[in-house]
Amino acid sequence: MTSSDGVEYTPTALDRDAVVYVAGHRGLVGSAISRKLKQEGFTRVVGKTSTELDLKNRDDVFAYVGEITPRYLVLAAAKVGGILANSTYPVDFLSDNIRIQSNVLDAALANDVERVMFLGSSCIYPKFAEQPIREDSLLTGHLEPTNDAYAIAKIAGIMHTQAVRRQYGLPWISAMPTNLYGPNDNFTPTGSHVLPALIRRYDEAALDGSASVTNWGTGSPRREFLHADDMADAVLHLMEHYDGPEQVNVGTGKDSTIREIAETIAEVIGFEGETEWDTTKPDGTPQKLLDVSKLAEAGWTAKIGLREGVTRTVDWYRLRRAALRGL
Ligand SMILES: NC(=O)C1=CN([C@@H]2O[C@H](COP(=O)(O)OP(=O)(O)OC[C@H]3O[C@@H](n4cnc5c(N)ncnc54)[C@H](OP(=O)(O)O)[C@@H]3O)[C@@H](O)[C@H]2O)C=CC1
Ligand SMILES: C[C@H]1O[C@H](OP(=O)(O)OP(=O)(O)OC[C@H]2O[C@@H](n3cnc4c(=O)[nH]c(N)nc43)[C@H](O)[C@@H]2O)[C@@H](O)[C@@H](O)C1=O
């Protein structure tokens, strides 16, 4: 098969005995991908924690990738955070991510990694992109200011995979996930995304018998949420069934208001008090709903519904509550 950029590659089942390097294998997405690959019979799934290998250190990255010489690589390591972390530390989100992805992708190229999956984020699209957001709306308008630095790093990552395809003919691809959640998410109050933040907040309020909780913003922004296990399933599916220079959106195709998400989480937790909104905190993008038709054409749709996914995540959180709260 020849792609629109001239790369000749026919997507096929990945070799279960080949080395697969999952960069970021302890995180929300990387851990789900590692689990999925092992469930599917992959025997040599490898990774290192950030303590063992700081991906910002180019020499160390080249040494490690040269040592393991993976046939496949999923780049799920990044500096990641919610709206507050992104808007407070833009330098870190830009600089760390540019360095991590340049090091890993350059080392992958130097070692002829056959198939690379780069993970971006739906925040790469313009703040006021037409909804649902199509892949071709990339670079057609201004970014959302609360995460523009992170988005620019991610756009550079997409371009990096496209450039490798053009210059070296390797069938590297990228996927743009919507907002994700699930086991191994970040549950810290100031660093996390909304879904884990609300699970923790409502759980604490239920335990303490609080009369009310206060969430950030107005509650009116719309977001689409995908469970990390679905994300992992989509990543493997795309690596085995998709090739092309254009990034592929990964989501459910359905969104809800933050207020509705809060109601679902409160119900699953069993919190019966009031919810208030702190409108001094930012709302961010008014709506982020991905057009997932390209993904559907590649043969994949989401399977885990929001209530089921939230229930599973609440159960996971409750088993680890003390450790996650640092108690
Ligand atoms: N979470 C979300 O809602 C979304 C995430 N994404 C993308 O998915 C990918 C994974 O995100 P997610 O799993 O949520 O993030 P997490 O924060 O859960 O995990 C990030 C991973 O990256 C690793 N990492 C970070 N910095 C370094 C470093 N300097 N050296 C080595 N490893 C490092 C961490 O390693 P360790 O644990 O060892 O410290 C961790 O395993 C990212 O590219 C992100 O942009 C896209 C859209 C939405
Ligand atoms: C995945 C994506 O994640 C970020 O963008 P975001 O979608 O705005 O993510 P968020 O989950 O942090 O917030 C979603 C909405 O929820 C509201 N909200 C209410 N209460 C809490 C709360 O307690 N915590 C948080 N974090 N948000 C809250 C919040 O005000 C906002 O309106 C970017 O980092 C971006 O770079 C990126 O890629």
Image (cartoon, rainbow, N blue to C red):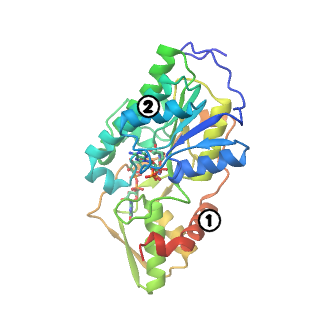
Which numbered disc covers residue 62? 2
Q: Residue at x 67, y 40 (%)?
A: 300
Up-down relation of residue 196 to residue 1 (above or below)? below
On screen, residue 138 versus residue 6, left or right, reads left
At label 1, which amino acid type do we have? Arg
Precedes in sequence: disc 1 or disc 2: 2
Dot 2 crowding, Cα within 10 Å, few <14, some 14–19, many 20+: some
Residue 3 drawn at (x, y percent): 59, 17
Ligand 1 within 8 Å, label 2 CB:
no
Residue 310 drawn at (x, y percent): 57, 64
Which numbered disc covers residue 312? 1
Dot 1 crowding, Cα within 10 Å, few <14, some 14–19, many 20+: some
Q: Residue at x 45, y 42 (%)?
A: 122
* Helix, strand or loop for disc 1: helix
**Distance from the alpha carbon under mark 1 to that under mark 2:** 38 Å
Instruction: Check the picture and name the quadrant holding the C terminus.
Output: bottom left
Q: Would residue 82 be seen by someone viewing this image from the given angle?
A: yes
